[in-house]
Amino acid sequence: MELAGGLGFKNHVVQNVLSRALWGKAVGREVNRAESGFETFAETAEPRLRVALVARYGPDIGSQATVDALTHGWKNWDRVQQMENPFGFLYRVGRNRAVRLLPRRGRPRFPDVDPGREPWVEPGLPDALGHLTPKQRQVVVLIHAFEWTQAEVAELLGIRPTTVQNHLERGLTKLRNALKVNDYA
């Protein structure tokens, strides 16, 4: 494993986390953490963690919260790796960080659809997503955009699958109404 210059890492976020976490650390300590499986864990957990946080808080805050959560995981890897659900724990760390990053009384900002190009999504979708509750938005995006199962979303959020189903149904109803798409075909 190479720590300098990002060599040896396929994922730039994992590289960023390790780079941030290693500042001021003794070389022997980071090798022990890497050997203990953090790099492997982070490479598999990062995409799911990023998707989950971006779905709830938007791309800017969600991405920053992902890096912060993984950094926390690296710094506390000895304790985190012993947990029954380390991914769920780091999701909650990222969620707490995102809440602190959110502007007061603001909705997450999703990218606008470029008016000069043929849209690949409904042009009103970003704004409509911003009007859903955070859990409704997260459930709808994870299930329909990223093809997660309701069981996976329930495990991530620490709620029952029936609660996920309720958030999904309510979120889709709000989206259909906001986009004036009441055709269920």
Image (cartoon, grey):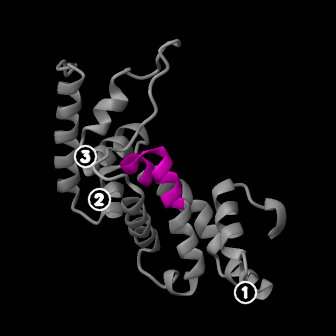
Where is 169 relative to 20, above or below?
Answer: above
Residue 132, position as x, y percentages in the image: 24, 41
- Say which residue label 3 marks: 136
- Which quarter of the image is occupied by the C terminus? top left
Pointer 3: residues within 10 angstroms few (<14), some, or many (20+)? Answer: many
- Say which residue label 1 marks: 29
Element at label 3: helix
Element at label 2: helix
Q: Sequence order check: which comes first, mark 2 or mark 1? A: 1
Outermost residue, front side: 104
Q: Residue at x 36, y 50 (%)?
A: 56
State whether the magenta stretch is mostly helix, strand or loop: helix
Q: Residue at x 17, y 54 (%)?
A: 162
Answer with the quarter of the image where residue 71 lies.
bottom right
Which span of residues is magenta-colored?
53-66
- Say which residue label 2 marks: 154
Which label lies toward us, 2 or 1?
1
Answer with the quarter of the image where residue 168 lies.
top left
The amino acid beneath tag 2 is Ala
Can residue 148 be seen in the rendering of this structure?
no
Pointer 1: residues within 10 angstroms few (<14), some, or many (20+)? Answer: few
The amino acid beneath tag 3 is Gln
Distance of mark 2 from mark 3, alpha carbons? 12 Å
Where is 103 relative to 168, above or below?
Answer: below
Element at label 1: helix
The amino acid beneath tag 1 is Arg
Residue 88, position as x, y percentages in the image: 40, 68
